[in-house]
Amino acid sequence: MDDEKPRTEDEHEQEELYELQEEEETSQRRQRLNADFLLDKVIPDEIDWRDLVRRHPMLSVGVAAGLGFLIGRSKGATIVAGASAAVSAAVMRQLSDVLDGEVFEF
C-alpha cells in the first residue's frame, strides 16, 4: 500500500521553481565554459593560462586591466555605441511590452 498523499499546488510550484533554478545554474555554467572555450581558442596551446592565473593572480588581473584599457582606448567609441544600442533596444522592448499590456488600455 502506498501511504503517499497527493501533491498540493504549493508543492508543484516549489518543484517548478527548483527546476527553473537548476536551469539557470546550468546556463551560468555554460557561460563560464564559453569564456574558457574562447580563451582556449585565443591563447596558444603551449601556454597554460589557468596555471598562470592560479600562480600569479594579481599579475593576471593587472594584465587583463591593461589590455582592457588599451582596447577601450582604441575601440572605445565602437564599444560604447554597441552597448548603448543594446541598452536602448532592451528598453524599447520593455516599453513596448508595457504599452501593449492591459495597463494603458482605456
Image (spheres, rainbow, N blue to C red):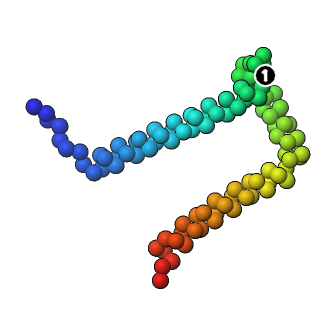
Q: Say if residue 56 shows up in the picture.
A: no
Q: Say if residue 98 shows up in the picture.
A: yes
Q: Position of residue 70 (x, y in %)?
A: 88, 41
State the residue position of label 1.
Answer: 44
Question: Among all residues in the image, which is located at the extreme bottom?
Answer: 106
Q: Secondary structure at mark 1?
A: loop
Instruction: Write the residue at 83% across / 32% down.
Output: 63
Q: Position of residue 52 (x, y in %)?
A: 76, 21
* Vertical relation: 80 (above or below) 44: below
Which is nearer the eye, 10 or 84? 84
**Amino acid under disc 1:** Pro
* Vertical relation: 18 (above or below) 105: above
Q: Quadrant of residue 68?
A: top right
* Vertical relation: 77 (above or below) 30: below
Lateral position of residue 88 relative to residue 68, left or right: left
Lateral position of residue 1 relative to residue 29, left or right: left
* Vertical relation: 89 (above or below) 102: above
Q: State the count of labels.
A: 1
